[in-house]
Image (spheres, rainbow, N blue to C red):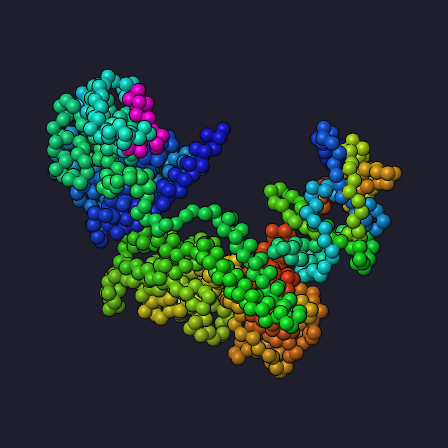
Amino acid sequence: MSTAKAAASADRSATETSEQYLTFMLAGEEYGVDILRVQEIKGWDKVTRIPHTPGYVLGVINLRGAVVPILDLRRRFGLETIDFGPTTVVIVLRATSGRDERTVGVVVDAVSEVYNVDPADTKPPPDVCGGVDTVFVKALATIEEKMLILLDIDRLIGSSIADELLPAVVAA
Amino acid sequence: MTIDLEMAEIAKVFFQESREGLDAMESGLLTLGATADGESINTIFRAAHSIKGGSATFGFAEVATFTHGVETLLDEMRNKVRPITAEAVQTLLQACDCLREMIAATEAEQPLDQGRIASLNGDITQILGERPTEAHAAAPVAPAAAANSAGSAAASADGGTSGWRVIFEPVVDLLRLRNEPTRMFAELGRLGDFTAHADVSRLPALDALDPESCYLSWNIEIAGEIPRPKLDEVFDWVDSHCRLEFTPTGRAAPAAGAQPVAQPSAATAATPAESKAVPPAEAERSPAPAVAAVQKSAGESGSIRVATEKVDDIINLVGELLITQSMLSGFADGIDPNDLDRLRQGLSQLARNTRELQESVMQIRMLPISFAFNRFPRIVHDLSRKLDKKVELKLVGENTELDKTVLEKISDPLVHLVRNALDHGLETPERRLAAGKPETGTLELAAFHEGGNIIIEVRDDGGGLNKAKILQKARERSLVAPDQELTDEQIDNLIFMPGFSTADQISDVSGRGVGMDVVRRNINDLGGHVQISSKEGRGSTIRIRLPLTLAILDGQLVRVGKEVYIISLLAIVETIQVARERVNTLAGRTEVFRLRDEYLPVVKLCDQFGVEPDSRSAEDGLLVVVEADGKRAGVLVDDLLAQQQVVIKSLESNFKSVSGIAGATILGDGTVALIIDVPGLIRSVAAQSGAAAAHAA
């Protein structure tokens, strides 16, 4: 499933020039999100906790009048949690699911770079990784001998918030 | 493609205007019986005429044809050719309903209910067929002819004509309205040979001549046996922008002379149907012939149509402004003391301006409750006929304004309450007389403001609730324990319990036992409250209390541990400090406390929401007594903070709904606070204790 999707997106954008990705660090790994989906980057600030939500939903903040949920990506990916430090930032992303568009912030260790990634240079993630988080991975890219993990924002946010069903491949 | 889209857009306006027109017709028809003044029948006629014209323009032939029959009937009434009878009004009301359905079906591109249309058409034709004496001059109506495409008696009048004389006198603006007379002449040419004489008497001197104006009028003679509808079609686009006269030439001609006597106001027309060609503008011939506008001006009071989303956007912006302002005020408390006074002054001015701006923006969404009340004369009219009861409907406070969203959602519950009052509340005339009451019952719908809320009351002077019967039913269904003593008020309010109906017979008006609980739930969902009080033999009053708007809420800020939540003031009954001896435990875990003669469950917000509180025991905190769905509970909080108006923000727009939480808002310090969903909280607590009890058993 994810293979097909990655291939399709590679085909689609092959005619265009490279895509830009904002990358960030999470437990020593470098992840990338489509820069067109990034609304802003802001420092970590206090949130209002919401009852009856999973641990990775830290709460909601006031983003210029909008009530925006904040997710802890370390917890979402089941990584070890750390205390938020001076480099900790919130990346505010726009995700779509169906016709709805949501604005959601994700807490990451630090922002890193903006890279141009040629879709032709990306590889689908290997199917053998068993972790649930591979469904959020759109593709892997290699930049300057580093591996970038390109995330599928819609799937990540959709499944984290609306309990949208994960693809059957993963469930099995 | 773009034309299609544009047409669809225009058609949408037509559908909307038709609905408004139908509403106007309906309310006009309902007043017809009482006051037979010329203006109301004219209003009805104009509405029908606009619908006909519009539907023909958009090619909704069936709607146009049907309306034509209605219009013919109305026209005869308008011209006093035909008396206004109760049956005719009833038929016309049904025709309104039918038209409303036809328009809905047309808009949804669904098939029309042909059977109903045909039968109503038949009714109308039959009424038209009962020729009143004054109209003897017209040719007798042959049923077969009446059933033909025009569906009206008028069509049959032209059976014997051998030609028509048409006077076509367009308004000066005809060309600017994008109509082209030569095109119509070309179409006329297709119907038969004709000669047209141009009347140049209106032509001004050359220097005063505006090349885009139409000063000509025409006198047209067309030969051949042409049915009237064919001619109508040619002039369909322009018939409200010109004076049209059709006179059959040949043997039916004398009829033309006979009619005008009965129609002094309308321009001479051969048969009643034809005077529809005289637009309302004729009556209000203004120097600047803004014909299209005149037709609608009657019921409008300088209003504009604005999409709700646009208004919502402004409301959001204003809400933010309010937040910024209170953020600044908080900030001002901690800076340089020298400039402080001026800053404070500026801020208080900002605060005032913001509040005023917010109020006026909120006003945009406010509509008078008459939008909901207007349907009741019709409902009461129909139902009282059906139930054989005499009812006088009184509407009070129709201009009381409330938010559009609230208004839309309250309409259905109100209909239900009114139907109930008519069916169960008011008695038949005989029983009323026997009870020494006036034969005609009174049903009153009243709306008024009370302290930031709107109150709607449905009052009847009927039999009232039968308390003994209600209590018996409630005991039968184990809604009440056999030995439980209830106050009169508590008994009355039992009717809001799910599955409760005391109707001996199930009628199609009401009495299926679904309803009152749904009414209450709908009202609770709006953040409102409903209760009933009744005196046996004297009538009942149902009182609905609603917030004026769903966008803003009067909130009580409460603190639990380090978190702040908001409870709607509407839901709060009182707040008390509890003495230790008043708190008891039930089955070792559920805590209850005694408030006067009631035991209320204690809901610990800290446990519900997983917060670390200052103290877990009830006597250290405060109990906020809340009520929803007729159930009460005490919510344990650590402290009460300020009361303030808060702008309600949806959690769902970027997140999802969370149980126990109705929404969020932004406080003066810029942080988000969650608004507690009181009905939801009470429900979930009831479910939890139910589960606990089941577990224990």
> Picture coordinates of residue B158 (x, y %)?
20, 26
> Picture coordinates of residue A87 (x, y %)?
80, 55
Tell which residue pokes out farthest to the right in this image.
Answer: A145
**Relative side of B354 to B37, left or right:** right
- Name which quarter of the figure residue B245 lies in: top left
**Whether residue B246 can be seen here:** no
**Whether residue B116 can be seen here:** yes
The number of discs equals: 0
Is B185 part of what is drawn in magenta?
Answer: yes
> Picture coordinates of residue B658 (x, y %)?
63, 57
**Relative side of A160 to B125, left or right:** right
Principal secondary structure, stretch drawn in magenta: helix
Q: Nearer the viewer, residue B249 or B327?
A: B327
**Quadrant that contains the C terminus of chain B:** bottom right
**Relative side of A113 to B180, left or right:** right
Residue shown at 35%/62% (left/top)?
A: B397
Residue shown at 88%/38% (left/top)?
A: A145
Is B146 part of what is drawn in magenta?
Answer: no
**Relative side of B57 to B171, left or right:** right
Relative height, residue B451 to residue B517 (above, below): below
Q: Which residues are magenta?
A: B172-187
Relative height, residue B606 to residue B366 (above, below): below
Residue shown at 72%/42% (left/top)?
A: A35
Q: Nearer the viewer, residue A87 or B217?
A: B217
Residue shown at 31%/36% (left/top)?
A: B52
> Picture coordinates of residue B265 (x, y %)?
17, 40
Q: Nearer the viewer, residue A111 or A131?
A: A111
Q: Nearer the viewer, residue B122 or B423?
A: B122
Tell which residue pokes out farthest to the top in this image.
Answer: B193
